[in-house]
Image (cartoon, rainbow, N blue to C red):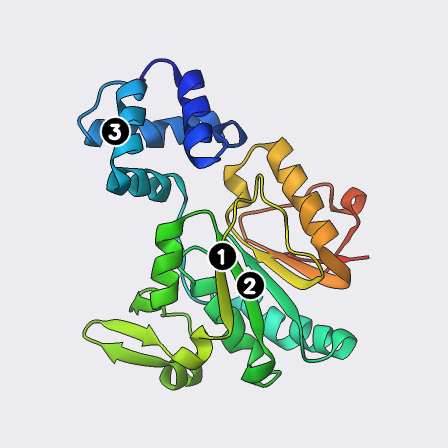
Amino acid sequence: MLDNYEQFKKDVYALTKIDLNCYKEKQMRRRIDTLITKNKINDYTSYVALIKKDKEKFEQFVNFLTINVSEFYRNPDQWKILENEVFPKLVEKFGKNIKIWSAACSTGDEPYSLVMALSRVVPLSNIKVIATDIDKQVLEQARVGLYNEKSIVGVPADLKSKYFTKVGNSYQISDEIKKRVEFKEHNLLKDPYPTGCHLIVCRNVVIYFTEEAKDEIYKKFHSSIVKGGYLFIGSTEQIMNYKEIGFLRNKSFFFEKE
């Protein structure tokens, strides 16, 4: 392993406002060292100098740092619960204009899935999803909305034929779905959270953070959700102290604000 990781963390924070102290060190450091070695550099100081002067290498670093594993309708059984139980409850409580935040949205698969799933319950014109991620590059990809076949394999057949157009070996999502999503850059560890959310979806991201950072994030999500709203988390995640935070567990991966 390379030397002086402590100083490197400070340099990265000064450059990107990404706090590496909030990530599991062993795992994150191994990933970073791999990238630095690929760039034929032997120490952190030289690598910081490189990403300071080379915009492309800087973007490559941020992109590599963020974990972008995404697909439409990931864990389909949970999406069925969302579509058949959670969405109807939210519409019944709050009406058709539901505020949804897709946090750490990666390449847009999740927020676009949310729009399509909710379109079965309310008209498209009523739907607005805020989608955020720390990584500019994946947000750019999300705005383009071009996906490979593997990414869209979980999309229900009727929605696939209605909202996707085949372009070569890829699939382009329709503009009518795209315009229901607003993409923004956002750092879960330092930026202010949206308020008045009826549903927050944040899946398979918080697992990469320390227990302290996780706790802080879940508390902030709780504050962002209106009473009776929901948090939808990933199948690899647990909120051990959900009762203390003020959530009721509603199915395995859905938590309702009391």
Q: Name the N-terminal-most of marks 3 and 2.
A: 3
Q: In this view, does 26 lie above or below 253?
A: above
Cβ atoms at labels 2 and 1 below 8 Å apart: yes
Q: Name the N-terminal-most of marks 3 and 1.
A: 3
x and y percentages locating residue 1 in the rendered image: 32, 17
x and y percentages locating residue 154 in the rendered image: 41, 70
Mark 3 falls on what kind of element?
helix
The disc labelled 2 sits on which kind of residue?
A: Ile
Marks 3 and 1, how far apart at CA: 27 Å
Q: Residue 94 carries which label?
A: none
Q: Residues within 10 Å of mark 3 (few under 14, many from 20)?
A: some
The disc labelled 3 sits on which kind of residue?
A: Leu
Residue at (61, 65) in percent of width and height: 100
Marks 2 and 1, how far apart at CA: 8 Å
* Residue on which disc 2 sits: 130
The disc labelled 1 sits on which kind of residue?
A: Lys
Is residue 120 among what the camera can see? no
Residue at (31, 43) in percent of width and height: 59
Marks 3 and 2, how far apart at CA: 34 Å
Mark 2 falls on what kind of element?
strand
* Nearer to us in this view, 185 or 26: 185
On screen, residue 46 versus residue 92, left or right, reads: left
> Farthest right residue?
258
Q: Residue 50 carries which label?
A: 3
Q: How crowded is mark 2: few (under 14 residues within 10 Å), some or many (20 or more)?
A: some
On screen, residue 109 versus residue 239, left or right, reads: left
Residue at (20, 71) in percent of width and height: 169
Cβ atoms at labels 3 and 1 below 8 Å apart: no
* Nearer to us in this view, 216 or 56: 56
Q: How crowded is mark 1: few (under 14 residues within 10 Å), some or many (20 or more)?
A: some
Q: Which mark is residue 184?
A: 1
Residue at (31, 67) in percent of width and height: 147
